[in-house]
Image: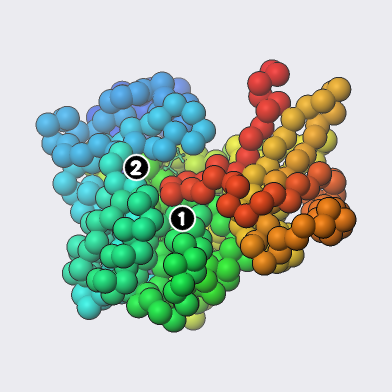
Amino acid sequence: MPAERIRDLQSEKLTSQVRHVYDHVPYYRSLMDQKGVRPEDIRGIKDIGKLPFLSKEDLRETYPYGMLAVPLSDCVRIQSTSGTTGKRVIAYYTQHDVDLWEECCARAIVAAGGSREDVVQVCYGYGLFTGGPGLNGGSHKVGSLTLPMSSGNTDRQIQFMMDLKATILCCTPSYASYIGESLKESGYKPEDNFLKAGIFGAEPWTEEMRRDIERLLGIKAYDIYGLTETSGPGVAFECAAQNGMHINEDHFYAEIIDPATGEPLPDGEKGELVFTSLDKEAFPLLRYRTRDICVLTREKCSCGRTHVRMSKPMGRSDDMMIIRGVNVFPSQIEAVLLKEGYAPNYLIEVDRVNNSDTLDVYVELLPEQFTDTVGGITAMEKKLAGAIRTMLGIGPIVHLVAPKSIKRSEGKAVRVIDKRKLHD
Ligand code: ADP
Ligand code: ZN
């Protein structure tokens, strides 16, 4: 659809969505009343800036059903966040909402080359977490043969992948990397499996990690983004251009704001991503602040899709660590590790000793890097610490540790332990 028509469609949907929310969600109605905005003031997307924001705190405050915009008897499902950053938030869906979400996931699978001929192995967790159910439903909608594996039990994942000739793998990037590593250990070469593509998301991952996984599995790796509050995965997905994720703009309107002031920023500028769901029924959040930091672009995409693209989120604003006054994202450290030839198996530990922040990075050696000479290891640690210092502007202490000594993740990886929080 040409951009202008998308905008008209969004305007039309927004107008009725605001009315729906105002009439059925007392919590949001009072936010609008406080701001002095009436539903009739919103005549299209151009007026969206008049609406109040919603944040995770609002959802915690209204837990469990304070955002419900339809009778509970119209709902058919709940899902919940992973609780990465605090108390869980729950989301509720009517059958229409489930269909809408699954259609978004179906688009992601098709964009990665999927069709009814494919065998889609879903090893995101099933249950409250949205990853498994979302991609499972999307795969059904495409008509692919779906393997509802859920996460974990890696030996069984590999056995089914080979026996049933899976062609598309869906999981977190950290689990994809773990599966790749396990395949290699079982003696398989990248060309031995039948996979052609992977759809990986739910956590931040770098371009370096993408290339690493592509090499390890012999596939093309596509990014997928979403959050429970908007539905789940599939809000945005990569096309063959692998250059930013197309947002399903007919269902979700995206804005970028300055996280400090709430002011909207123009395309191309980095800021916090804010979503308005345009046609969800049960849990229709307006101007929801994701805390994810990224950039939007409307430049033409070589795939032909006209939907706006978002860059990889560089981490959540609350993932960012301030160490000795410097802003540090785990993804920056990951990029250096992979560039220096290490595997993405690492743990970042931040602490405060004598009022000064400390940064320790534990990195696993690959079996072929393993050496018995202490001098050799020390030199490697120094070199890596230097490369990280060049990237961040502050120096870490690097600890190279034995292969397989850092716990692997089957879902969202935990990369940071910030012990300073214990002292606060
Ligand atoms: P929680 O907030 O508890 O982790 P969710 O499971 O709903 O709950 O996770 C949504 C969050 O996961 C997003 O806000 C974002 O920070 C992160 N995320 C999801 N997909 C991606 C992706 N492709 N790249 C980076 N981060 C992602
Ligand atoms: Zn594209």
In this rendering, the answer to whether 224 lies above or below 67 is: below
Ligand 1 within 8 A of label 2's CB? yes
The residue where tag 1 is placed is 175
Question: Is 91 on the left or on the right of 266, as rendered?
Answer: left
Ligand 1 within 8 A of label 1's CB? no
107 or 169, nearer to the observer: 169
* Amino acid, disc 1: Tyr
The residue where tag 2 is placed is 129
- Could you tell me residue 27's position as x and y percent? 35, 24
State the SS at label 1: helix
The mark nearer the N terminus, 2 or 1, is 2
Question: Is 35 on the left or on the right of 317, as rendered?
Answer: left
- Most extreme residue toward the top is 424
345 or 278, nearer to the observer: 345
Instruction: Report the residue at 85% width, 46% height from top.
Output: 395
In this rendering, the answer to whether 110 lies above or below 13 is: below
* Amino acid, disc 2: Phe
Q: Which mark is nearer the camera, 2 or 1?
A: 1
- Could you tell me residue 198's position as x and y percent? 41, 68
Regarding residue 421, the answer to whether it shows in the image is yes
In this rendering, the answer to whether 42 lies above or below 387 is: above
Image quadrant in which the C terminus is located: top right
Instruction: Report the residue at 31% width, 24% height from top.
Output: 64
State the SS at label 2: loop
Instruction: Report the residue at 42% width, 25% height from top.
Output: 60
Question: Is 52 on the left or on the right of 38, as rendered?
Answer: right
- Could you tell me residue 368's position as x and y percent? 67, 67
Q: CA distance from mark 2 to mark 1?
A: 15 Å
Please rate how many residues cluster around mark 2, counting C-alpha atoms within 10 Å: few if below 14, some from 14 to 19, many from 20: many
In the rendered image, which quarter is residue 109 located in?
bottom left
- Could you tell me residue 242's position as x and y percent? 51, 72
